[in-house]
Image: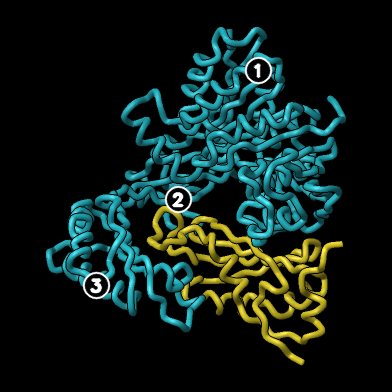
């Protein structure tokens, strides 16, 4: 069965600025979750998700050793820390924003991708 | 040359971080070898430039002098702790002299202050703005278009100057602009006797520096799991224990709040990076793709496997130029259809500015509380009953913004019912120092060191 859940169920994140661009790192809780994100969370999907903020391009980098993906969104900060009139001129909130994305996956895969219970 | 791990703490992640943190960390950790303190951001260099224009004796982070004063009792009790900081800003020599004045006569042992200078390339940019390396890295625009409005231009120096100063016996090293991780790499080079071509080791130390450079961001601060992390009332600042092979363990003092876990470490590894296979620093080009992150104990995470290649042939330059003025104002709107009312009130005000002959070149209207932090990305279906109206204006001319600043709070009596929260006084107009990232040839930049003896 396919279910729809927010990305935060299977991943955590961190974002920050690089001038007028920002990066958003997305880290899966499990190896299975990472494999799913590699196929699901494409640069196109992330670019489309953040398109209201006006990024001019989105590049994705894979870090399989950390179960992480790094997205660099060019010009998403409308001028960056010094010029942007936005409240979040440094992209501090983009990590929380991407974790709200609704994703679709099978319930078995979801089970294998959620936060592992600490022993 | 020793083989014990070098224990390097960070007690200041940015100018504005907890002022009490450096002394607290040093007191909590008697076996700390080095304390690194980062005081610089894009904006702080511009502020220092303006200060220095008015008074050639300032232009550095004066908080650091207070910090040094507070550390005197620790040194008097025999602490061998050394400090490496970029607090020198645009005036590292003056900063060092002021430190010496504060320490003079207080310490009963030889004590040296090392200063690294040479990062300031402002004259070079003013004289030769057509150098294609000075083109804006983001916009591919030539510096010719802004060089007459240039305020600062500083190359991010590497760890070599810091290491040289330490080798000459410095107890405090003060720099201007250096790459943040280099504050950590410098002590490692001096302590372990690494060569500047030991790229694998430099890569490991750069990772350690990258992890601790933002202070508590690696000990639970801004973590996705922040709410679940026991913070106590005081979060611990980070310590990197760097080994002779460049690998490190990140930890924090006992009995402090926060957490060092694979999760906090992985998050900070990803902070403000681009291509993880080519993390550029003036010391080494680092690959993150072979890193292994392992929790080896409570609040102890080991990071191994960094790979290094030679650094770029250029230094990254952070420069700023005057780009007009900006102002922000906030008002709280409560009640039925609050965001709609807020937006209408703001538009009314902007129209008034335009009609009076003061149209701003750029303006923004945000209804905070209604998804405005990431507008259009996160949209709520329900209408909220309160929001903060935030207006931002930017213009070449200060007068344009002054008209707005004098009009905006008239909304308290002419705006929608439920308009409140205007008690902070008229909004403050600020000069904009826009960021101009570029490069410079290494051979045009000459890092040099000076040593000051404290008597």
Q: Nearer the viewer, mark 2 or mark 1?
A: 1
Query: Is B439 situated left or right of B359 in this image?
Result: right
- The image shows residue B226 at horizontal and vertical percentages of 64, 58
Same-chain status of marks 3 and 2: yes
**Which residue is painted at 85% across and 48% down in the image?**
B297
Q: Is residue B313 visible?
A: no
Task: Say which mark, if any, is on residue B416.
Answer: 3
- Which chain did the renderer colour yellow? A
Query: Is B31 situated left or right of B454 in this image?
Result: right
Chain to which the residue tagged by mark 1 belongs: B
Q: Using the numbered discs, state the Cα–Cα distance from disc 3 to disc 1 in whole angstroms.
A: 60 Å
Chain to which the residue tagged by mark 3 belongs: B
Quadrant of the image containing the N terminus of chain B: top right
Tell which of A21 and A90 is nearer to you.
Answer: A90
- The image shows residue B92 at horizontal and vertical percentages of 50, 26
Q: Earlier in the sequence, mark 3 or mark 2?
A: 3
Tell which of B152 and B106 is nearer to you.
Answer: B106
Residue B160, quarter of the rendered image: top right
- For the residue carrying disc 2, how many other residues have a C-alpha within 10 Å: few (<14), some (14-19), or many (20+)? many
Q: Which residue is mark 2?
A: B436
Colour chain B is painted in: cyan
Chain to which the residue tagged by mark 2 belongs: B
Q: Earlier in the sequence, mark 3 or mark 1?
A: 1
Q: Using the numbered discs, state the Cα–Cα distance from disc 2 to disc 1 in whole angstroms.
A: 41 Å
- The image shows residue A110 at horizontal and vertical percentages of 77, 80
Q: Which residue is mark 1?
A: B75
Instruction: Determine whether the residue tagged by mark 3 lies in a helix, strand or loop.
Output: loop
Quadrant of the image containing the C terminus of chain B: top right
Task: Say which mark, if any, is on residue B126.
Answer: none
B86 is higher (above) or lower (below) than B110:
below
């Amino acid at each position: 069965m396919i279910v729809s859940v927010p990305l935060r169920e299977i991943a955590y994140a961190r974002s920050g600025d690089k001038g007028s661009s920002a990066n958003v790192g997305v880290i899966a809780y499990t190896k299975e979750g990472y494999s799913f994100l590699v196929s699901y969370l494409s640069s196109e999907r992330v670019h489309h998700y953040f398109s209201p903020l006006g990024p001019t391009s989105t590049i994705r980098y894979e870090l399989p050793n950390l179960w992480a993906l790094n997205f660099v969104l060019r010009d998403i900060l409308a001028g960056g820390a010094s010029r942007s009139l936005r409240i979040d001129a440094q992209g501090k909130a983009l990590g929380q924003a991407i974790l709200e994305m609704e994703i679709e996956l099978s319930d078995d895969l979801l089970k294998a991708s959620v936060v592992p219970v600490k022993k | 040359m020793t083989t014990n791990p070098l224990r390097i703490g960070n007690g200041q992640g940015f100018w504005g971080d907890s002022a009490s943190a450096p002394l607290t960390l040093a007191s909590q950790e008697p076996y700390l070898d080095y304390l690194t303190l980062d005081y610089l951001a894009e904006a702080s260099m511009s502020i220092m430039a303006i200060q220095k224009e008015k008074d050639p004796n300032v232009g550095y982070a004066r908080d650091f002098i207070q910090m040094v004063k507070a550390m005197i009792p620790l040194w008097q009790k025999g602490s061998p702790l050394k400090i490496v900081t970029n607090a020198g800003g645009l005036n590292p020599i003056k900063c060092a002299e002021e430190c010496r004045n504060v320490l003079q006569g207080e310490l009963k042992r030889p004590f040296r202050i090392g200063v690294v200078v040479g990062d300031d390339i402002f004259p070079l940019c003013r004289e030769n703005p057509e150098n294609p390396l000075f083109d804006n890295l983001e916009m591919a625009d030539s510096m010719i278009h802004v060089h007459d409005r240039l305020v600062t231009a500083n190359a991010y120096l590497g760890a070599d100057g810091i290491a040289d100063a330490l080798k000459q016996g410095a107890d405090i090293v003060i720099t201007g602009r250096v790459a943040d991780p280099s504050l950590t790499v410098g002590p490692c080079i001096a302590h372990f006797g690494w060569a500047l071509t030991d790229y694998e080791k430099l890569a490991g130390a750069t990772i350690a520096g990258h992890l601790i450079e933002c202070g508590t961001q690696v000990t639970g601060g801004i973590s996705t799991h922040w709410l679940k992390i026991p913070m106590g009332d005081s979060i611990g600042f980070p310590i990197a224990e760097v080994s002779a092979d460049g690998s490190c363990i990140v930890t924090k003092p006992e009995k402090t709040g926060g957490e060092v876990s694979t999760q906090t470490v992985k998050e900070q590894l990803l902070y403000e990076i681009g291509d993880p296979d080519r993390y550029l620093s003036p010391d080494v080009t680092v690959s993150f793709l072979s890193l292994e992150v392992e929790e080896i104990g409570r609040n102890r995470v080991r990071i191994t496997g960094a790979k290094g290649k030679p650094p770029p042939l250029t230094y990254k330059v952070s420069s700023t130029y005057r780009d007009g003025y900006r102002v922000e104002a906030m008002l709280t709107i409560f009640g039925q259809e609050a965001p709609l009312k807020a937006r209408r009130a703001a538009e009314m005000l902007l129209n008034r500015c335009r009609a009076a002959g003061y149209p701003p070149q750029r303006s923004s209207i945000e209804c905070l509380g209604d998804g405005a932090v990431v507008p259009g990305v996160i949209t709520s279906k329900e209408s909220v009953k309160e929001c903060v109206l935030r207006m931002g204006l930017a213009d070449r001319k200060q007068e344009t913004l002054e008209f707005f600043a004098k009009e905006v709070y008239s909304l308290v009596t002419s705006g929608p019912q439920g308009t409140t929260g205007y008690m902070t006084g008229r909004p403050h107009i600020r000069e904009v120092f826009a960021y101009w990232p570029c490069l410079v040839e290494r051979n045009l930049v000459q890092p040099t060191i000076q040593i000051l003896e404290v008597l």
